[in-house]
Image (cartoon, rainbow, N blue to C red):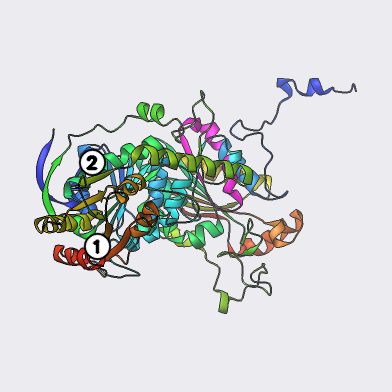
Amino acid sequence: MKELRLMKGNEAFAEAAIRAGADGYFGYPITPQSEVMEYLMAEKPEDRTGMVVLQAESEVAAINMVYGGAACGKRVLTSSSSPGISLKQEGISYIAGAELPCVILNVVRGGPGLGTIQPSQSDYFQATKGGGHGDYKLIVLAPSSVQEMADFAGLGFDLAFKYRNPVMILSDGAIGQMMEKVMLDEQRPRLTEEEIVKNTPWATTGKTKDRERNIVTSLDLDSAKQELHNHALQAKYREIEKNETRYEAIQCEDAEYLIVAYGTSARISQKAVDILRAKGIKAGLLRLITLFPFPTEVISKLADQVKGILTVEMSAGQMIEDVKLSVGCRVKVEHFGRMGGIIPSPAEVVDAMHNKIIGG
Amino acid sequence: MAEITKEEIRQPENLIYKKTDLLTDKALSYCPGCGHGTAHRIVMEVLEEMGIQDKTIGIAPVGCSVLAYEFMNIDMQQAAHGRAPAVATAVKRLNPDKFVFTYQGDGDLAAIGTAETIHACNRGENIVIIFVNNGIYGMTGGQMAPTTLPGMKSSTSPYGRDVHTMGNPLKITELIAQLPGTIYVTRQAVHTPANVRKTKKAVRKAFENQKLKKGLSFVEIVSNCNSGWKMTPRQANEWMVEHMFPFYPLGDIKVND
């Protein structure tokens, strides 16, 4: 049954993964997301649902365990933070190439390198533009609350299996660490062997006499065939763009000035919009929920309506490139952000709107 | 004596040997004289004899046997370079009633995948690892491997492996035999019919161990790489006996029954 709890974002994600009927979690400790595995280990999901939880020897091993589990049609996930996600890129590329479904949580911290353990949004390019080698896309969900940390575990699995594609939940250290109330879904049953064979006929479940062998690979030495595979992947990504774009338009109906943001930055920006509105400035917020697919069309439409757009990101300005591509020079688009693990204040966002857009 | 026709030869009563159905009809992509083909056959024959082919998932590596799934007629996954033991770990943990094996070469298992190998062995994952050691990177064109012998020439040690600058060959099989998670560690070869029989026995024992949930079984097969070693198949086998076997002696290293 549904249950209301007060939880950290990381814990809510872990609990929601169990309730989403996950078969396995494979991870490696890294701040600020270690609570995910700590929570799972303490919960003994093996007893609750039969879910396997394993601490791997490295991020590299963990993502390859996800590959193995996903190739068997199992609902598997991993979580990490920026430096660990960099290590996982090889495996993520293979998973995308072999078209395997899985959920990967990135609780982003500041970089580059070891950087800081404080929240950041500087992994946007890595998450939305591929990250590893080869032409591929992840479905990228950006939670901005503990509730969404929980909700996106189940949604992530649903999208991953619908499209046979890895899903990344691009969170940040603030959303992962903060506590909020969260309504948890009821327990979904894990799939039975029979259901897995029926739902994922491509999976390596053991070659029975009634079918050909199943091979999970990302390799094709025949370039013509590999290009066909590349075309099929691209067609899938276009389909995802058509069907799965998600966003929340807040006070955008009459907006003259628009903020585009996601995650923690969207929460700060919502407060900034309230301050601007109190001053009589018609500001609105477009909060992105999917970063891939990117809501190009809605931004393009809003560009015809507003006088200027401010993007707010905890980075040097990454998402702004996609916003600019959507706008195409019709109105001014400027970036405001903080880096190094610093979260901007609503007052700073208001100032940036005044200085860079309204008065700029 | 009357001449025997082809039709007569093909009569079931004259059949003394048959390729297992678990090998596909696709021509092997390995060089003539290479040990991989025999190693493939042994593994597939064991699965067939145990009747577990419909419950087995194989993990192919990166290397010469990257296309093992083209020849092995069972469900297979192709892993990233060195990661097969991690992949196999999850496959087995999530499917404890299935049989799971990795099939890896020396570069895959003992260089880029050292961490995954050691930790899967140390956890005692209930899987079988088949390790084909020919002392060279075959597929990429004969580069120095972690198991290349001292003084041995390769394309990246063209004057011979200098252990002072290139490091010593890694006896990873002896190393993993030290780990409590391994139940059976053995080193075999496939260059003579007698050795093929011994290897098959070892592979059978490894899968029987998995059936009994005993832990990780590790079967090294010392093999030749005649093209990488720049020798004829026959010379390569002789060189292997003369040089590889003294450094990598055949036989059981650890048997916990």
Residue A321: x and y in percent read 38, 59
Q: Which mark is residue A31?
A: 1
Is A252 situated left or right of B100 in this image?
Answer: left
Depth check: B196 or A13 in front?
A13
Q: Report the chain holding disc 2.
A: A
Amino acid found under the numbered disc labelled 1: Thr
| Residue neighbourhood size for the residue with mark 2, other residues' Cα within 10 Å, grouped as few (<14), some (14–19), many (≥20) | many
Q: Which mark is residue B157?
A: none
Depth check: A183 or B5 in front?
A183
Tags 2 and 1 in contact by the CB under 8 Å rule? no
Q: Quadrant of residue B163?
A: bottom right
Q: Which residues are magenta?
A: B46-69
**SS category of the residue bearing label 2:** helix
Asked if residue B6 is among those painted magenta in the image, a careful observer would answer no
Tell me the distance, in whole angstroms, between the alpha carbons under discs 2 and 1: 21 Å
Depth check: A107 or A67 in front?
A107
Q: Is residue B240 above or below residue A249?
A: below
Residue on which the image places disc 2: A18
Asked if residue B56 is among those painted magenta in the image, a careful observer would answer yes
Residue A66: x and y in percent read 38, 47
Is A126 situated left or right of A359 in this image?
Answer: right
Q: Specify the quadrant that holds the C terminus of chain A.
A: bottom left
**SS category of the residue bearing label 1:** loop
Q: How many marks?
A: 2
Residue B209: x and y in percent read 43, 42
